[in-house]
Image: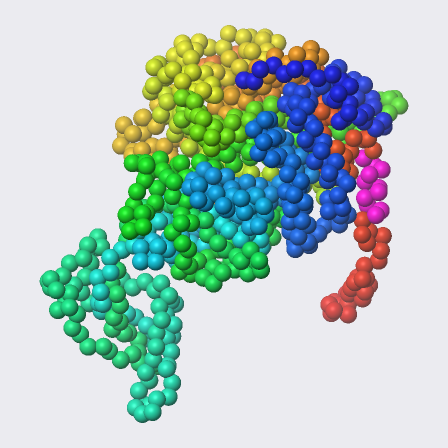
């Protein structure tokens, strides 16, 4: 928890946030009981406010950052995103000295970019940060030249882990990097399209270098020439098999009745049983065996003649290489394209995977390697690799620990994604709330005016819990991002304290739960916002559709949400048996395991709060969540143990305990932490008027989350009789109490209008004027289409039956 923030005078804030334009939102703005500017300090400070202001001012004045009226083509979208990326990079808004002084600027810069355009933010992060951070984390000092080169934008990076046929199961990946001690090179190879690296952001058109994850194979032994029966052509059709290139060498000076030929193999697999291994060969485990001690005695057969047109099978002599050892997934810096021409290097097939359902400014790509050699020094082998002779060395005895360390960079990505999804929700909730405040439908009989739809109960419950969730998540993500930056700086500087290892594990566990929790809340919230804006919400100009599509990817990349939750629950299940001995301060430096304090007693007592006010009290809600988290952990642990007693192995027992157990456990663990963090921050906020509203939002957020687990509260015997009914009444009450504050709260959250890009969500509340302006000026909106004849003379191209 951070120390209480120093209050900043309203006048200082006004420099960055002048008065908002007067208009249809005035009525609601007057109802707000707190300062919307001051409320920003619950997650921002003057440094981050100033940074965001500088970035937005820079964008607003720069011609490259002007929005176009109509949708761009895919190519134009990528092109403008690249130009904006270099313009931003060139400004160096967050140089390392600034980050060390104020770690929060990292998130603030990201937020400023996401509020403008998410493709820009993602493209910049992939090209510069993720590439450089991986090298800083897993590389050696002599590789830091690449970090400098990328910082100076001489090269551009990307992160290539996922393959066509393997994503979440990284251990199943098939790109290989085989070490050749003779040349001190790694030979990168993709066996087939299924082993192609795929989805790699920024690789499609631009990256010159990639961090590639590949199986490191230390080279096998060459046992000399051996013979094999190799099927060449299908005997029924005489067509060559895939992987075989066979042909005729042409006219000779004699013996032209014989079709002499050539053949090449491209990673062509034949069964082991086709080896002619009477005089020597490998056993099923790859162990070489021969009755001859002297290899030259074993080698004594004549060379066959291959038929250019006719042979279906050949006796092929080839060097028998017994397979090298596979040391698992390792990372490499792989040159992809010439930085001067952007043309791929020979041996690299690289391309763009095409249009996606969002984020189209980012050129996601694929790459395949065809025995492509890279120097040994490009292996990121700080955590394990081969020496010059091909001998494998690693500081980790346990390969899974080495693998975890080399993928550590993904933990950082997950922390950032909790914030990214919150950015999307933040924008959507501003649009939908402002629009709901000016959109009027129906009303009391004889009323002069219709009622703003924000007054209707169902509109409130679809929006206001998500407004509260936005504050909860924004506060949590800002703090979590800062923890990450501190950890990363300590790691580079070698200044870790004695809790560093425990903190690293807990950051991984918490990010594995918080990323799905924040991503899914954003998914549901944004969809509600879209529907809450009725038909106009479906217009692209509302801005909500893009937010929905762009958040969608957060649920999948950097760890598919459901699988991340498995990682979290595996950790929690390991903690449960130690619950009585655990030293929370040492083993849980972030405090995510505080729910285990006196856990056995907590679990024995049912909920003692009965009235509506008690049930939505912020402190009481944190205690109810404590019970719920502990209960889910206990019951999930017991279910896994029972399945194991009944004979299931570990994998099966865990698999059969996911739905309603482990998955729910991890979601609740994440929610519990975010709720507690929100509560602690709200109650310690200095400004009294803001604090009161914040605590109302804690009530609404906590009660709304808890209500979704109502069945578990009753099944576990914690709730009985009317407690559930009172909790629901409390949610509705908090919605009605927060409705008058809602517009002022969205003023706190809103980026400048220049970034909002939404006809429904501008700060002046003039949704209809903006809608009219957009519709009337949309290119071609009032023009007759060029294809008008296809309407009038349709029977000229479709024979009429009328
Ligand atoms: C926009 C975007 C950008 C991306 N950028 C990059 C990038 O820059 N670099 C990169 O390397 N990758 C990138 N990716 C790829 C991304 O990281 C993967 O898509 C992600 O890791 C999920 O892997 P997958 O697609 O193979 O899904 P799979 O692992 O095949 O999952 C498919 C489904 O099966 C389920 N499933 C799988 N295993 C289990 C199990 N054991 N138990 C229960 N359910 C299971 C999953 O939950 C999921 O619902 C990107 C993806 C997207 C969408």
Quarter holding the N terminus?
top right
x, y percent for residue 705: 56, 22
The residue drawn where x is 80% and y is 26% is 18
Dominant SS in magenta: helix
Structure colour scheme? rainbow
Tell me the quarter of the picture where residue 118 sits: top right
Looking at the rendered structure, the number of numbered marks drawn on it comes to: 0
Residue 660, visible in the rendered structure: no
Q: Is residue 769 magenta?
A: yes
298 up-or-down from 754: above or below: below
Q: Is residue 675 magenta?
A: no
Image position of 107 (left or right of 172) = right
Residue 144, visible in the rendered structure: yes
x, y percent for residue 10: 76, 18
Image position of 790 (left or right of 326) = right
117 up-or-down from 784: above or below: above
* Nearer to us in this view, 516 or 69: 69
Quarter holding the C terminus?
bottom right
The residue drawn where x is 38% and y is 40% is 382
* Nearer to us in this view, 675 or 92: 92
x, y percent for residue 131: 51, 43
x, y percent for residue 259: 33, 84
The residue drawn where x is 49% and y is 45% is 145
Q: Which residues are magenta?
A: 767-777
């Amino acid at each position: 928890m951070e120390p209480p923030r120093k209050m900043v005078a309203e006048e200082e804030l006004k420099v960055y946030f002048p008065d908002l334009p007067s208009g249809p939102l005035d009525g609601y703005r007057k109802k707000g009981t707190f300062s919307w500017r001051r409320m920003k300090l619950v997650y921002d400070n003057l440094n981050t406010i100033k940074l965001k202001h500088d970035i937005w001012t820079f964008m607003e004045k720069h011609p490259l950052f002007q929005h176009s009226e109509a949708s761009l083509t895919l190519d134009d979208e990528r092109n403008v995103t690249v130009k904006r990326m270099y313009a931003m990079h060139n400004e160096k808004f967050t140089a390392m000295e600034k980050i060390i002084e104020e770690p929060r600027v990292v998130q603030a810069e990201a937020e400023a970019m996401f509020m403008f355009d998410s493709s820009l933010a993602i493209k910049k992060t992939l090209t510069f940060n993720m590439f450089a951070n991986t090298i800083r984390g897993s590389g050696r000092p002599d590789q830091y030249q690449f970090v400098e080169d990328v910082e100076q934008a001489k090269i551009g990076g990307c992160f290539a882990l996922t393959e066509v046929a393997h994503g979440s199961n990284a251990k199943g990946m098939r790109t290989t990097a085989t070490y050749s001690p003779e040349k001190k090179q790694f030979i990168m190879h993709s066996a087939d399209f299924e082993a192609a690296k795929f989805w790699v952001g920024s690789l499609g058109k631009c990256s010159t270098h990639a961090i590639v994850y590949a199986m490191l194979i230390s080279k096998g032994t060459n046992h000399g020439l051996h013979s094999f029966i190799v099927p060449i052509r299908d005997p029924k059709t005489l067509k060559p098999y895939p992987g075989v290139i066979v042909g005729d060498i042409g006219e000779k000076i004699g013996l032209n009745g014989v079709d002499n030929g050539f053949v090449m193999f491209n990673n062509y697999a034949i069964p082991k049983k086709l080896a002619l291994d009477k005089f020597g060969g490998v056993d099923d485990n790859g162990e070489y065996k021969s009755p001859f001690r002297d290899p030259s005695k074993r080698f004594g057969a004549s060379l066959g003649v291959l038929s250019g047109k006719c042979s279906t099978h050949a006796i092929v002599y080839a060097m028998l290489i017994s397979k090298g050892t596979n040391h698992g997934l390792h990372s490499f810096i792989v040159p992809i394209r010439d930085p001067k021409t952007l043309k791929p290097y020979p041996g690299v097939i690289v391309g763009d995977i095409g249009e996606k359902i969002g984020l189209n400014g980012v050129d996601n790509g694929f790459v395949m390697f065809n025995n492509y050699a890279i120097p040994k020094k490009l292996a990121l082998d700080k955590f394990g690799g081969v020496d010059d002779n091909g001998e494998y060395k690693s500081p980790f005895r346990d390969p899974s620990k080495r693998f975890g360390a080399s993928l550590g960079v993904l933990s950082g990505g997950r922390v950032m994604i909790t914030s990214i999804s919150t950015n999307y929700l933040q924008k959507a909730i501003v649009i939908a709330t402002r629009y709901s405040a000016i959109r009027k439908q129906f009303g009391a009989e004889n009323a002069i005016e219709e009622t703003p739809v924000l007054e209707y109960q169902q509109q409130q419950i679809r929006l206001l819990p998500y407004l509260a969730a936005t504050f909860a998540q924004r506060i949590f993500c800002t703090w979590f991002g800062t923890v990450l930056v501190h950890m990363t700086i300590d790691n580079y500087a070698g200044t870790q304290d004695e809790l560093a290892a425990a903190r690293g594990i807990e950051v991984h566990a918490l990010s594995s739960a918080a990323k799905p929790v924040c991503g899914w809340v954003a998914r549901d919230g944004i969809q509600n916002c879209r529907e809450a804006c009725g038909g106009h919400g479906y217009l692209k100009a509302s801005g909500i559709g893009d937010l929905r599509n762009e958040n969608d990817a957060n649920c999948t990349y950097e760890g598919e949400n459901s699988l991340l939750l498995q990682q979290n629950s595996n950790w929690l299940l390991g903690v449960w048996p130690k619950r009585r001995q655990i030293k929370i301060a040492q083993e849980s430096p972030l405090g995510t395991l505080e729910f285990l304090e006196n856990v056995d007693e907590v679990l024995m007592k049912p909920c003692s709060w009965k009235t509506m006010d008690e049930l939505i009290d912020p402190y009481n809600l944190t205690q109810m969540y404590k019970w719920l988290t502990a209960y889910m952990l206990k019951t999930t642990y017991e279910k896994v143990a029972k399945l194991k007693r009944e004979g299931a192995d570990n994998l099966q027992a865990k698999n059969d305990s996911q739905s309603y157990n482990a998955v729910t456990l991890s979601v609740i663990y994440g929610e519990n932490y975010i709720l507690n963090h929100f509560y602690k921050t709200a109650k310690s906020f200095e400004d009294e008027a803001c604090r009161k509203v914040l605590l109302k939002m804690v009530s609404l957020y906590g009660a709304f989350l808890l209500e979704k687990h109502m069945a578990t509260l009753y099944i576990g015997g914690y709730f009985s009789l009317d407690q559930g009914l009172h909790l629901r009444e409390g949610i509705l009450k908090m919605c009605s109490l927060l409705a008058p504050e809602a517009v002022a709260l969205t003023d706190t959250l809103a980026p400048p209008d220049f970034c909002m890009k939404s006809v429904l969500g501008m700060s002046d509340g003039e949704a209809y004027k903006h809608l009219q302006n957009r519709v009337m000026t949309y290119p071609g909106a009032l023009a007759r289409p060029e294809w008008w004849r296809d309407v009038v003379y349709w029977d000229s191209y479709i024979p009429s039956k009328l």
